[in-house]
Structure formats: structure tokens, C-alpha cells
Amino acid sequence: MKRNRKIALIPIIITAIAGVILYYLALPALSFKSAGFWWYVIILLSLFEALLIIAGISGFDNNKTIVTAGGFALGLSLLIFVIMSFASSRLFNSSDYANLMRDNIREVDFSTYQATLGNVPLLDRDSAIQISNRELGSLIDVVSQFELGQNVQITLKGKSVRVSPLYYGSFFKWNNNKNAGTPGYIKVDMMTQEAELVRLEEGIKYSPSEFFGRDLKRYLRIRYPSAVFNCYNFEIDESGNPFWIVAVEKHTIGLFGGVDIDYVLLVNAVTGEISKYSIKEIPDWVDNVYSSDLIISQYDDYGSLQNGYWNSVLGQKGVKVTTDGYNYIPQSNDSWIYTGVTSAGRDESNIGFILSNKRTKETIYYPISGAEEYSAMSSAEGMVQHLGYKATFPLLLKIEGQPTYMMALKDDGGLVKMYGMVNVQKYQIVATGDTIQSTQQKYRELLKNNSMDVSETETERITGIIEAIKTAAIDGTTYYYIKLRSYDDYFMLNIKDNQLAVLKEVGDTIALDVDKVNTGKIKNALMIE
């Protein structure tokens, strides 16, 4: 009898050990509102029940009561999980889902739209990663031990940059460098496309590439065992200090539904210090709180569930959803996500588009009908079909006063070779060129030829004495950055459209045509004399 009792403890011991190991690896939130927690419980109960059955078959223990109790607990857990999943679904809570974003949305006329060539960088994520990898590869002391981590777009002091922390290349490289941490992060200016490795006095010691107690998720789980972490984003504050922005979600509909952000944790990537902020208290320098997927999901619920769940599936009266794909448009000191809005039929046309603030979830809807993004991309690619270039997902900009899709055209190697502009409302108006300026000139002429309204106050002429000149090679084209006396900004000229710029020196007088709508620190310009 005593022997059987001891053997009966074996399933309990094995399950307990498995539970500790599984928790350490999977790190589920210890919350009834976390689906991960329920799966954790179900897996352990399944293991325990299987071990009890095996023990019974082997003749070690014939206590059917324990087996039955274990099976009941497993079945009950599965039943609760399934029932609460259905009870939390859109099928039974369509109006609640539709209201998740309702108070954050306002409709605005396109005439107020602020995104232009002058204040929105055209560098896409893939190109930024290429530039970052190139910078990393040039650093012999770093490239052999570390690799690029998460690449995130932020707005830093009004400038758009992409930042990537360095991760350990492997467990063995972590073991060699764990005391010092990773040396820092790579920052790419999205206007000048200049990259630099920012070396920190003390290395980054808390990140997803760490192991054991300094692994970011494990480090947070120990301190916040019941928190359901939504997303982790690497950012830097205005002093260049690295942080992890961790959004903690709440479920507002049933047990598992209605995901929204409850509060935010800021984790100092060097010291591990954690600060907790409510949604209204988040520092202004933070950009990424609401993930792009969460924003799009909530807007889709708002647009599709206004008249109930079954209407969103069957009749689809008044149903509108976001298009496939999105991009980022920086404005002021915030990062906004842009995506088109189309009717439920997805007939290759948009009925409008939205901008949504990733820090506050403020969402602006612009009602403009026209081509959806992929149709515009196909139109631009058709203009260079003989070259085989592929268009990047476009930015929606106001160019010549018109809503315009702006995109880069890349070769098979991922290098930008040309640019394309496609009018949103008349997507047969397509201009391509080797430079942004030449593309804009062609686009302007096409608009005039098609009797479209063209802004006549797009540029202003300025004259000044050159105070400083800098150069940068971007995708094979040389750009000159000229600073004039009495002006705080730099004026960017590409060599293809401004060949005489190479002859200019500090102290020379120069005349430039500059876009009036430019609001960034670096302004596109054309040299006149």
C-alpha cells in the first residue's frame, strides 16, 4: 500500500516539474483573462491525466477516483475556455467591438492634410535595414559578435529616424559579452539616410536577445506576473537613452475580447529600471504604444460591425474595412499609421483613408474616393515594366495640392532606382523619374494637362550666402545639404537636377526655389543660380 502511494505521487511530481519548466519557457500571464494562462492549465491537466492513466494501465495505481477527478478538471477547463471564447466573440458583442475606437475617430477634409514631400521621409523600412546592416558591417569590432535587432520608426526632436538595438549573435556570443552587454544601437536619419552606431557608456543589458533573468519578457514577467503584454518596442528618448516601451493590454469584452491598452511600462534597456504610466501620462517622446495591428483591428471592427455581426458577414450594408498594408507618416513629434479604407467588396478602390496616432490612438478619417494602394503600385510599375522595377507600399502625400501616392521603384537587389507619383482620384495620372524633383515636375505637367487643380503657391524663392555644405550618397545619387546664413534649416539638392551645385563653395551666394509647405529641418530645393 505504501509503495502504491509513493508511486501515485510520481504523476504529481512530474506534472509539477513540467509546470515549472513550461512556465519558465512560455511565461504565461497568471490571469484568468489571458488565453495563454488557460492553455497553460489545460496542457498541465492533460499531462497529469495522461500520467494517471499510464500509471493505472501499468498496475501501479488503481485509484479511479483520482483519474476521474483529473479528467473532470481537464474537461471543465476546456469547457470554460470554449464557452468564454464564444461569449467574448464579435458574434455576441458586435456593438461593443464597434465602439472600441468610436470616440477616437473624427472626420476631416483633405484640405487640412499636412503630409508633404518636405516633411515626410521617403525611406522605407527595408532600405533602412539595408543601411543599418551596411553600417554594422563596417564596424569590425562589432559585426562578429552582434546583429541587428528590432527596427522601429520613431520621431526624435521632430526628425524621423529608425533605431535598431544590437542583439547577441548566439548563446555563445552572449556568454562572451554578457557582462558588458551589447554596445548600443544603430540610428538611421530617414531624411539624410545617414547611419551611425550610438555607443553607450554602459551596454544594453535587457533585451529579447538576453538569456535567463535578463531576457526582457522574463524580467518583466517576474515583476508583473499577471500583466498581459501586448507589444514591445525599442525607442530612445530625446537624450539618446534606450528604452523598451511595453504596452500592457486589458480585455474589455467578456473574458478574452475587446483588447485595448491599459497602461505602459518603460524599461531602461541599460539599468532595467521600470516606470509605469497610465495612457494619459505617457511621456511625449514615446511614439509606439498601440501596435499597428491593434489599430487596424479596432478600426475594422468600427467600420464593419455598426449594423451587427451578421450584416458584416452577409448583407454588408455600410461595411467598410482597411486595405491590405499600411505605412508610417510622422507629424509634429508623433508617429502616425496610414492605411486606406475600402468598401466590403474590396473592388480595388478606396472610399477614404485614416491616420492614427500610435501613442494616443487619435484617428483622423479623410473621405476621399480613388484607387487603392496596390492599384496605384501596379500603375507605377506599368510605367517601367521594361525595367522590371517593383514599387514600395506608397505614402499618401499632398503634392501640388492633390492627394497623391508617392512610392519608390526598386530593382531586384532592393536598390531605389526611380520614384513614382500616382494621383489618388485619377490613377491614370502617373509620373516616374530618376529623382524626386524630376518626378514632381512631370507630375505637375500631367495634372495641368488633365485640367486638375494645381497649387500655384507651392514654392518660394530665397537667396543667401552659403554657410556650410555637406554631401551624402543615397541610392547611388549624390545629395548636397546646404545651410544658408540667417536660416536654421538645411536645403537638400540632388546632383542630377542641380549639377552646378558641385561648383559652389562656402561664402558663395545662391538662389533656391523651396517648397513653402516644407516643415521639416531638411527642405527639398532646386538651385536657380
Image (cartoon, grey):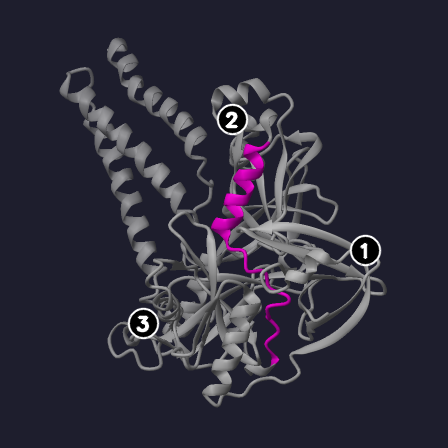
Badge number at residue 211: 2
Mark 1 and mark 2: span between their CA atoms? 52 Å
Query: Which residue is at the far bottom?
Result: 451
In the displayed structure, would residue 232 be above or below residue 519? above
Circle 2 packing at 10 Å, graded few (<14), some (14-19), many (20+), is some
Of pointers 2 and 3, the one earlier in the residue sequence: 2
- x and y, in percent, of residue 211 in the image: 51, 26
Residue topped by disc 3: 309
Give the SS element for disc 1. loop
Task: Kindly identify which residue carries mark 1.
Answer: 506
Q: Residue at x 65, y 23 (%)?
A: 180
Q: Is residue 62 visible?
A: no
Q: Is residue 226 left or right of residue 345?
A: right
Amino acid type at image mark 2: Phe
Residue in the picture at 63% in, 85% down = 456
- Residue 51's disc is none
